[in-house]
Amino acid sequence: KNLVSQSRDAYGFARAFMLTGNETYLTMARSALNFMYQHAWDSLHDGWYATLDHVGTARSPGENKTAFDQHYALLGIIANYEATHDTLDWRWLMRGYQSNETHLWENNPQYFGYFDYGSYEWNTRLNKSFNATVDAITTHVLYLYLLTGDQVYRDRLLQ
């Protein structure tokens, strides 16, 4: 199972509920998110595993963690939070967000932005790209600001 697919499934089902009011979509979104919460989080080093087998075992626990995966993991979580205001989703959203800020963001005023990837244990962080930063905006930072109005998310958007 691919982390990004699980998150995108949750996103699609949460948005389908928001459009239709059909709670069956919330059940499907919850299923995708529960799988992520139970299996996809690296509890030893932080961050999300990119691929898991059908029972939730990380396929390559020692592979690099990409900004793409770390940001897109939050897409389904924040959509479901917006639809339900479930505190479980909020806690996971904050856990993932803080991991991204701690491990991927470079706060150097001259070179700020998100790194493209880090080693599985975050000992090294390499490369930067437009995508690594813009993906954060489109997957969660803009939503965090719109949902909360919190200055910290506005500041991150402006940066």
Image (tube, rainbow, N blue to C red):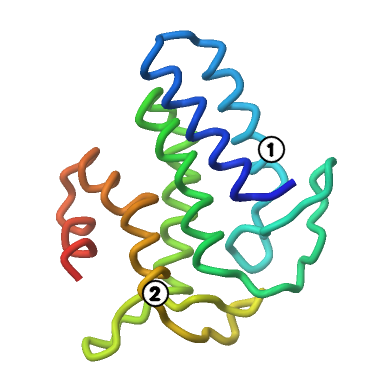
Q: Which amino acid type corresponds to the residue marked 2 in the rendered image? A: Tyr
Q: For the residue carrying disc 2, how many other residues have a C-alpha within 10 Å: few (<14), some (14-19), or many (20+)?
A: many
The local secondary structure at tag 1 comes to helix
Q: Amino acid at mark 1?
A: Phe
Residue 62, position as x, y percentages in the image: 76, 73
**Left or right side of 136 for 153:** left
Q: Position of residue 98 (x, y in %)?
A: 42, 61
Q: On the image, numbered disc 2 is attached to which residue? A: 114
- Asked if residue 108 is positioned above or below residue 98 in the image, the reply reads below
Extreme residue in the bottom direction = 110
* Image quadrant occupied by the C terminus: bottom left
Q: CA distance from mark 2 to mark 1?
A: 27 Å
Give whichever of 46, 7 is nearer the camera. Answer: 7
Name which of mark 2 and mark 1 comes first in the sequence.
1
Q: Circle 1 is placed at which residue position?
A: 35
- Residue visible at 37% across and 19% down in the picture: 18
Which secondary structure lies at badge 2?
strand
Specify the quadrant of the image occupied by residue 136.
bottom left
